Amino acid sequence: MDVRISRSPVSGRARAPPSKSYTHRAILAAGYADGARIDHPLVSADTRATMRAVEAYGGRVAPDPAGSGSSRTGSGEGAAADDASALAVEGFDGRPDTPDDVIDCANSGTTMRLVTATGALGEGLTVLTGDDSLRSRPQGPLLDAIEQLGGRGESTRGNGQAPLIVGGAVEGGRVSIPGDVSSQYVTALLMAGAVTEGGIDVELETELKSAPYVEITLEVLAAFGVEAARTDVGFSVEGGQSYRTDAYAVPGDFSSTSYLLAAGALAAENGGRVIVEGAHPSAQGDSAIVDVLERMGASIEWDRDAGEIAVERSDLRGVEVDVGDTPDLLPTIAALGAAAAGETRIVNCEHVRYKETDRVAAMATELEKLGAAVAEEPDELVVRGGDSDLRGARVAGYHDHRIVMALSVAGLVAEGETTVEGAEHVDVSFPGFFDALRGLGAAVESA
Ligand SMILES: O=C(O)C1=C[C@@H](OP(=O)(O)O)[C@@H](O)[C@H](O)C1
Ligand SMILES: C=C(OP(=O)(O)O)C(=O)O
């Protein structure tokens, strides 16, 4: 499905969906436990993949009518929870069963990395696969870590990419992995390590990128009564621990919030503003979007107690942003840069090339179609906007939710009409994205 977006003013309130990162971890943590209720989960294509994995390992995930708010029963395994405001997870309680079938992680890197480590705890073998994008993303360092622990971790094609085969009932130990490919390897090993006999010590060979995501992991583990910590060389989790909690509430998602704030900063109507609800402080590095917008000159206010961020249309100027900790903000910042005066330099972004698509290249190519001047280096993206208006064009979404959302926001200020291809991919992290934009008054039509 394509969407057509016309230049249009926005104003009013929108709610950020629940956090994808917290939801994945909470569902899997409840799987490692004997179960738990998850309040306000994100139910999206990616988190449904984690639900399916927990079920494959012997758990069960369903809407929980006893949870906070209302819930609607859907159908189908894992996807049973289509619109749930709470999930009841029955766990596999420590070690996973051997799955009856291959686990399809679809488009979700988080699912694949986190549940690959779970599979390595099993007596039998687990086979994991995903869509074309996921089968091209790097899994080698995690497979290597599993082998260092005495388990079996193989790529069927021998190229470090899925399909993967894992098993070996690992009992813990020491591993050494790079930190600059994906923090999800660390999260995976810490979550699995807690239920091994000996625990897992992770030594990082290179500086950790996306570090706040490991902080999210430590926060969720603590909420489930599991201790893990930073060490001088990396991270460590003791073995023999049990995951336990009755209920876990997922906070709002700051990566998703970034598109709504960007829409407000670029296109709020004169005298109006966009207010994003559900924005309570948490460990999410992507809350840095508030600071980035402020530095770009936006009039923005975050009421942390109320969990509300208000932003007005502002004349933005380019800034330098290091996205080492916040890779998922790159598409949003690039889109903002295309509409800001002067140069926006996004640095430390090489790891952003290993996502659903190479997002550095994708944003460079598509923003040029909208009229921005863009230069790309291996770990930098420089966007020069502002000399004249962006102009509407047909742009590719690369089957990538964040590229689709960022380009749609740019479409709000491009002259004429912008067509974004593959709009259905927002289902990965923000299924209600286009409804939220329409609710703010944006002119968005399905094409
Ligand atoms: O652990 C997580 O929830 C995530 C970690 C980040 O990936 P990397 O650690 O691979 O950079 C981020 O890009 C992804 O969207 C979600
Ligand atoms: C990269 C992302 O997620 P994942 O790694 O889980 O596919 C994302 O949501 O931008």
Image (cartoon, rainbow, N blue to C red):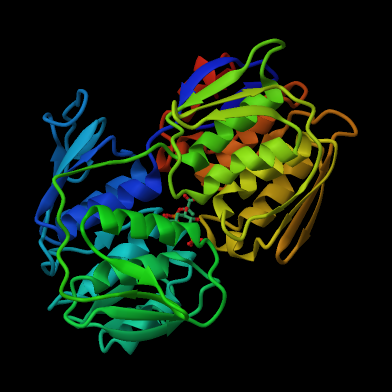
Q: Residue at x 32, y 51 (%)?
A: 24
Residue 254 at what x, y percent from top left? 49, 40
In the drawing, does residue 270 fall left or right of residue 245? Answer: right
Who is closer to the viewer here, 210 or 81? 210
- Residue 152 point in image, percent of width and height: 27, 84
In front here: 180 or 371? Answer: 180
Q: Residue at x 42, y 30 (%)?
A: 278
Residue 416 visible in the displayed image: yes
Residue at 50 percent of width and 18 percent of height: 13
Q: How many marks can you see?
A: 0
- Residue placed at 28% from the left, 76% from the top? 165
Indicate the quadrant where residue 145 lies.
Answer: bottom left
Give the quarter of the image for residue 252. Answer: top left
| Looking at the image, residue 18 lies above or below residue 331 | above
Q: Is residue 315 left or right of residue 101?
A: right
Q: Position of residue 263 (x, y in %)?
A: 63, 27
Which one is in front, 420 or 168? 168
Residue 397 can be seen in this image: no
Q: Position of residue 220 (x, y in %)?
A: 30, 54
Question: For the C terminus, which image quadrant?
Answer: top right
Place residue 346 in its image quadrant. bottom right
Is 13 above or below relative to 343? above
